[in-house]
Image: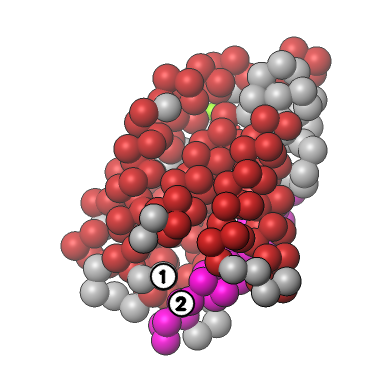
Amino acid sequence: MSVNFLIHSAKEIQAVIDANASEIEKLDQEIGDGDHIFNVQRGIKLVIELEAVIKDLPMSKALNQIAMKVLSGIGGSSGALFGTLFMTMAKGNDIDNGVDYKKAIEIFADGVEAVKQRGKADVGEKTMMDVLIPVSNCLKKGVEDNKDVKEILKEAIEVAEKAMFSTKDLLATKGRASFLGERAKGHIDPGARSSQLMIKTVCESVLNS
Ligand code: ADP
Ligand code: MG
């Protein structure tokens, strides 16, 4: 994983999120305050605009710049949570000497763990953690089991999609949707949907490379 790959991925994610914007907007209108798509699109735009600043930086510094931008530039829960993800990835051990797929999975998993601590949400609470935690576990398990990287990524795409759909029938116990009680049931969590689309995009990008 190179800084170039990060920038390239952000551009691919932008296209996918834009193509699904009305669906994501509607999901947050149903169980939140409707701003999730705006927060996500703004975050992606800010990251892409960093291209000239980060393209020649070592990985740790590039990820840190992305984290700062996301933390300061995006409102809502998403800013703090995605900022924490990148901030933690930036602190990954020895990442300036190259990030292979095992290292990428390790720092992503550390990032997800930090987001879990930050937001105090676990699986089953109808948030993006319902997608991020199972995907992180699937990736780590794939490495432990010495699976082929393509196999691991295909599995992660499937796990993410299943996890995203699983939020539909959950009651929300964290975030704005928790104020709705039973009325949150029947709607997919917007953060779970946007996270699933981002994960799918990055995994497919590696699979097609
Ligand atoms: P806000 O909820 O502040 O309006 P967004 O609309 O950008 O922020 O993001 C909403 C998404 O954030 C939710 O759909 C959910 O996935 C996620 N979320 C909310 N609270 C938490 C939390 N404590 N931990 C993890 N994710 C959360
Ligand atoms: Mg919102």
Name the element at disc 2. Answer: loop
Quadrant of the snapshot with the N terminus: bottom left
Residue drawn at (30%, 48%) of the image: 11
Up-down relation of residue 131 to residue 83 (above or below): above
Q: Is residue 114 visible?
A: no
Going by the image, does 171 lie left or right of 52? right
Q: Position of residue 88 (x, y in %)?
A: 55, 66
Q: Position of residue 71 (x, y in %)?
A: 45, 52
The crowd level at tag 1 (other Cα within 10 Å; few <14, some 14-19, many 20+) is: some
Residue 69's quadrant in the figure?
bottom left
Residue 47 tag number = none
Residue drawn at (36%, 71%) of the image: 2
Q: What amino acid type is highlighted by mark number 2?
A: Val
Query: According to the image, label 2 marks what residue?
Result: 99
Q: Earlier in the sequence, mark 2 or mark 1?
A: 1
Whether residues under marks 2 and 1 lie with C-beta atoms below 8 angstroms apart, the answer is yes
Q: Identify the magenta region.
A: 95-120
Q: Answer with the quadrant where ligand 1 appears in the image.
A: top right
Q: Is residue 188 visible?
A: yes
Going by the image, does 169 lie left or right of 192? right
Name the element at disc 1. Answer: loop
Query: According to the image, label 1 marks what residue?
Result: 1
Going by the image, does 209 lie left or right of 117? left
Q: What amino acid type is highlighted by mark number 1?
A: Met
